[in-house]
C-alpha cells in the first residue's frame, strides 16, 4: 500500500514538472539602478528585550541588529534584479532587500498589479527599524519581519 502511494505521488510530481516545463518560464539576473536613501548602519550592540512594543507584538529582535537611523541623502544605487516571466506575467525581485517583489506586471495589458516604488526610501516601521515600501515583501512569522531589508 505504501509503495502504491509513493508511486502515485512520484507520478504526480513528474506530471506537474512536465506541465511546468510547458509553461516556458524564464529567469534572468540583471542589475537595476534606483535612487536610494540609504539607512544608517546597523547597531553593533545586540538588542535584548527592552519593553519596546512593535505593532502589537513584543519587540524581541535578538540576535538581529537594529537599523533605526535614516539619512536624507539620495544616491543612485545599483542592485541585483531577478526577472521571472512567462508569456502572461513578468515579475522583478530585489534579493538584496529580502527578496522584495518590486514589480508584478500583466504583460497583456501592461498593468502593474502592485504599486511599484521608483525609489528606495526606508521608513522606521519595520521590526528592526528600516522598512521599504512598495511591491510585496515576504512576511513570516510576523508582518514587516526582522529580515525584510536584509539580503537573501
Image (tube, grey):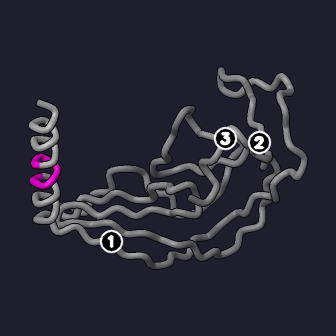
Question: CB of mark 2 within 8 Å of CB of mark 3?
Answer: no
User: Residue 36 location in percent, x, y?
Assistant: 65, 66
Q: Tell me the number on the disc at residue 1.
A: none
Instruction: State the extent of the magenta-drawn residues as a range.
Output: 11-15
The mark lying in front, picked from 3 and 1, is 1
**131 is higher (above) or lower (below) than 78:** above
Q: Is residue 65 left or right of residue 35?
A: right
Q: Tell me the number on the disc at residue 27.
A: 1
Circle nearer the N terminus (2, 3) = 2
Quick check: is 13 in the magenta stretch? Answer: yes
CA distance separating discs 2 and 1? 34 Å
Q: Quadrant of the N terminus?
A: top left
Residue beneath the point at 51% across and 75% down: 32
Circle nearer the N terminus (3, 1) = 1
The residue carrying mark 2 is 63
Disc 3 residue crowd, few under 14, some 14–19, many 20+, Cα 10 Å: many
User: Residue 23 location in percent, x, y?
Assistant: 14, 63
Please tell me how many numbered marks the rendered image carries. Answer: 3
The mark lying in front, picked from 2 and 1, is 2
Residue beneath the point at 27% across and 71% down: 26
Magenta region, main secondary structure? helix
Question: CB of mark 2 within 8 Å of CB of mark 1?
Answer: no
Of the pair 35 and 6, the residue shown nearer to us: 6
The residue carrying mark 3 is 126
Label 1, secondary structure: give it.
strand
User: Residue 121 location in percent, x, y?
Assistant: 65, 57
**83 is higher (above) or lower (below) than 135:** below
CA distance separating discs 2 and 3? 15 Å
CA distance separating discs 3 and 1? 30 Å
Amino acid at each position: 500500500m505504501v509503495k502504491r502511494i509513493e508511486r502515485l505521488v512520484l507520478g504526480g510530481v513528474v506530471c506537474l514538472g512536465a506541465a511546468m516545463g510547458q509553461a516556458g518560464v524564464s529567469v534572468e539576473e540583471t542589475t537595476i539602478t534606483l535612487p536610494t536613501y540609504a539607512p544608517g548602519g546597523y547597531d553593533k550592540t545586540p538588542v535584548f528585550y527592552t519593553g519596546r512594543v512593535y505593532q502589537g507584538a513584543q519587540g524581541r529582535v535578538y540576535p538581529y541588529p537594529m537599523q533605526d537611523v535614516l539619512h536624507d541623502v539620495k544616491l543612485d544605487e545599483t542592485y541585483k534584479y531577478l526577472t521571472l516571466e512567462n508569456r502572461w506575467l513578468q515579475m522583478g525581485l530585489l534579493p538584496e532587500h529580502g527578496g522584495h517583489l518590486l514589480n508584478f506586471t500583466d504583460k497583456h495589458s501592461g498593468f502593474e498589479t502592485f504599486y511599484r516604488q521608483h525609489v528606495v526610501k526606508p521608513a522606521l516601521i519595520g521590526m528592526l527599524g528600516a522598512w521599504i515600501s512598495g511591491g510585496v515583501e515576504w512576511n513570516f512569522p510576523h508582518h514587516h519581519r526582522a529580515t525584510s531589508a536584509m539580503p537573501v
